[in-house]
Amino acid sequence: MVRKVVTWVDDRLGASRFTRDVLAKVFPDHWSFLLGEIALYCFVILVLTGVFLSFFFEPSVAESVYRGEYEPLQGVVVSDAYRSVMDLSFEVRAGMVMRQIHHWAALVFLAAIVVHLVRIFFTGAYRRPREINWMIGLTLLTLAMFNGFTGYSLPDDLLSGTGLRIAYSIALSIPVIGTWMAFLVFGGEFPAEQIINRLFVIHIFIIPVLIAGLLTAHMALIWRQKHTQFPGGRRREENVVGERLWPTYAAKSMGLFFGVFGILALLGGLVQINPIWLYGPFKPAQVPSPAQPDWYMGWLEGALRLFPAWEITTFGYEIPNPFFPAVLLPGITFTLLYLWPFLEAFFTSDHKPHHLLDRPRDRPMRTALGTATLSFYFILFAAASNDLLAKWLRVPVENVVVAYQILAFALPLATGLGTYLIAKSLTKREAEPPGAAPETARTS
Amino acid sequence: MKVFMTAIAVVVAVGAGIIVWNAYSDRPAEPWLPPAVVRSDSTDGKTLYMRDCAWCHGAEAQGTGRGPNLTERANGTAHIDYVLSTGRMPLDSPDQPMQRRTPIYTQEQIDALVQYAEQQLPITGPAVPELNTTEADLGLGNQLYQVNCAACHASTGIGGALGGGGESLPLISRKAAILAPDLFEATPKEVAEAILAGPGTMPVFGPETFTQRELDSIVDYVGRLTEPHNPGGWSMGRTGPWSEGAAAWLIGLTLMIILIMWIGTRSTE
């Protein structure tokens, strides 16, 4: 019976040959090649939990008096958006755990993307012919950050409202077009009534569709161009050594999906995230403190906190201060990231295709640049919570700011130099024949 | 490698030198100080005041070079009861920062001191408040807390850093930072006293700011806020997106990386 159905389908679609090719596809083996897959499965879980949440969320800032389960909020005027997230958390069955899994999945999604990007960078996997996929990956990172921020803003609580206010001010700071752009996006002067509804459409429709499309392209390109592999063993530039898709790789991948889902469910069930009932509804006259964005926006927040209060004037007009740390810096960051494969090819005059990965130590210059850059953005990220650090250390915030300003320059230099020297000494040690060491020990 | 190590050693040595120099260079000449207050059994307000407080605040609460005038700010016995029952006073030495500590006095001794201050010293300002939380409205308290308190003590009650007034201090300084403390250990009476008396840099929220019912409602909300009840699970100290990001990396992604290292390991070869 099964055979008959299968033959019937195959007669019409000719699917068996295609399926056989697909299932026999070979994937190289290394744990770090699964980092991107963690991100992929986080996205799947984001879509699953997000669909559930969208059944209950009301994207409206119309106000009503809260009469729900959470006692300390009773009698307080709140927006429909805020109230629906409160109801979702306290009254909808499994609403709280779904919300928490969704938010945890978003945080881990971005963390996985960043680690995946770092792996690609340090192993040189973006080199010809994979420059396009590198750029698609970067676009996915940008979209994921935007969608994280829009999702963070939807509950209309005091913390996320403060984040939106910062976003609005950053938009205003863009020379010439800033005011028009801020009004266009927000639909008027902050806090505009349109923004929650617009964010909702962007968050649940526009960006997820773009991400899904680009993810497909991202994986299709891996398929078409074949996955890179580390040198060694039988692995050459012109072959791919590893497991076939069916059954080994598919089984591993399914196992990973359930593992990722399990870990996110554990976090969602056991660890509290974004307690909007404590933050309260957004009121334009209030600002919470300490206030941080979700971690992936931390570097921008930190840049805003560290950038000196300079008044910079050109052609008789002052360029608003937030423009430099919050528009120019990310602009430069992503431009350099997009151009990196071409910059490296230009500076190293290496335009050949590469299918074998580099070991980071064999490219000390690139590796040193990478760690220096990472340490710079890490300091920016850490500076986003300077007030918390000041509180724990019991020192004035101003001192923490100055310390971070110094570290933002000193740490990348030290890290880059240290990385370069370590990489050099590692390759040098490998080059020395074994047994040479006692000789030098005796003479010194 | 040897050059590299030497460079590190030099950097560490110079850094340590700067820290030590900073820590000692701004130290003022030590004035003669009274001995730290020790526990005693006396429950006589006058005895306790004259022995433990008058050293710095003067016999008439007029203040000395070592401690401030207690009548000047007119923050009343509410403030005296607040600093004594939170252990902020007496200090071991005048330059010690005022922080919550285990009170050195028993409740009976604190009451005796407050009574002495009320009757024998020229203290003006709010008295130790009476609370009536049966009339309190949690929702009202919540709103008032968000508007008046959360900017410094945080919506979550964990407190926060308030900055040094824009003044840039030496990088390593003995001067303490201005902090709004967390509220988790504060009793309802202490919360009300702090609102009325405005200890330290905290503003005074007197009867012209809050009615008795509003005061009761804020106190009631703070009590509710600081309950160790977190409907979402482990609160991670309620430090917000900071700790959430840390958990996403150190628990979430770390467990997943361990998982892929295990999945990615081949059983043979």
Image (cartoon, coloured by chain):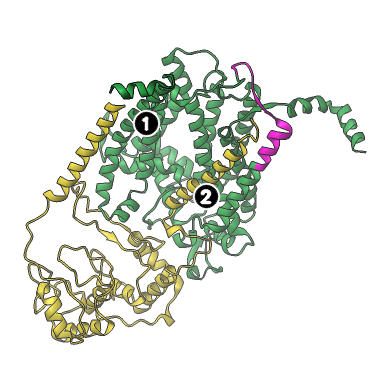
> Percent x, y for residue B204?
25, 69
> Percent x, y for residue B39?
21, 78
| Numbered label attached to residue A183 | none
Q: Is residue A3 left or right of residue A234?
A: right
- In the rendered structure, the residue with mark 1 lies on which chain? A
- In the rendered structure, the residue with mark 2 lies on which chain? A
> Percent x, y for residue B25?
11, 48
Is B30 covered by the magenta stretch?
no
Chain (yellow): B
Q: Is residue A345 left or right of residue A287?
A: right
Q: Quadrant of the C terminus of chain A?
A: top left
Magenta residues (range): A236-255
Q: Amino acid at mark 1?
A: Ala
Image quadrant where residue A334 sits: top left
**Mark 2 highlights which residue?**
A196
Q: Amino acid at mark 2?
A: Ile
**Mark 1 highlights which residue?**
A372
Of residue A22 and residue A64, the one placed in the foreground of this image is A22
Q: Residue at x 24, y 70 (%)?
A: B88
Assign a secondary structure to mark 2: helix
Both labels 2 and 1 in a single chain:
yes
> Percent x, y for residue A21?
75, 25
Chain (green): A
Which label's residue is closer to the chain start, 2 or 1?
2
Looking at the image, how many numbered discs can be counted on the residues?
2
Q: Residue at x 54, y 30 (%)?
A: A137
The reply to whether residue A57 is visible in this rendering is no
Give the label, 2 or 1, closer to the camera.
1
